[in-house]
Amino acid sequence: MLIAEIVQEIAELTVENRKGVEALFSAESHLADCEKALDTAEASAFLAGAGSVAERQARAKLECAEIRFERDLAKAQVNRVRTKLRVIESALMAQATMSKLMQAEMKL
């Protein structure tokens, strides 16, 4: 691998990392919206219910299952973006290490 290829790879990874930061913000915003919707729906369902506290909580939980699922998917998306960012950062470090090794070889 040539130094120019390493430099190009580092530049591409840096661009991907910047995009990842924006994707993480977007995913976290979506997660916050989903959590807000779930909290609101659960509270409304609980207040509208009748019976004991345990019965009202169970009904509210059942009524909000689809919203909870959407929230769980949003959490999974946030985790996926974070994992992808870690992979990109690891690749950046590996490329930087390769670059330093090549520079050390050139000095010999």
Image (tube, grey):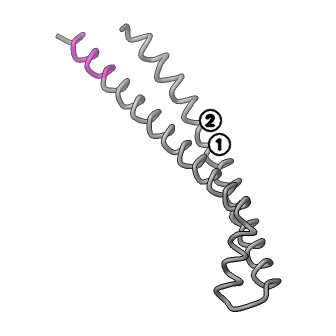
Write the residue at 71% across / 72% down.
Answer: 39
Q: Is residue 34 magenta?
A: no
**Percent position of residue 4, x then y:** 44, 10
Which quarter shows the N terminus? top left
Contact? badges 1 and 2 (CB < 8 Å): yes
**Percent position of residue 63, x then y:** 75, 69
**Prevailing SS of the magenta stretch:** helix
Q: Residues within 10 Å of mark 1 (few under 14, many from 20)?
A: few
Measure the alpha-carbon separation of dots 1 and 2.
5 Å
Q: Residue furthest bottom?
A: 52
The answer to which image quadrant residue 34 occupies is: bottom right
> Which residue bears the numbered disc 1?
22
Q: Which residues are magenta?
A: 98-105
Left or right of 91, for residue 50: right
> Which residue bears the numbered disc 2?
19
In this rendered view, identify the residue nearer to me: 68 or 7. 68
Q: Residue furthest top?
A: 2
The answer to which image quadrant residue 35 occupies is: bottom right
In this rendered view, identify the residue nearer to me: 10 or 89. 89
Left or right of 47, for residue 105: left
Left or right of 50, for residue 14: left
Q: Is residue 99 magenta?
A: yes
Left or right of 44, for residue 62: left
Which quarter shows the C terminus? top left
In this rendered view, identify the residue nearer to me: 12 or 61. 61
In this rendered view, identify the residue nearer to me: 46 or 39. 46
Amino acid type, mark 2: Lys
Write the residue at 79% across / 84% down.
Answer: 49
Helix, strand or loop status at disc 2: helix
Note whether 78 is above or below 90 in the view shown: below
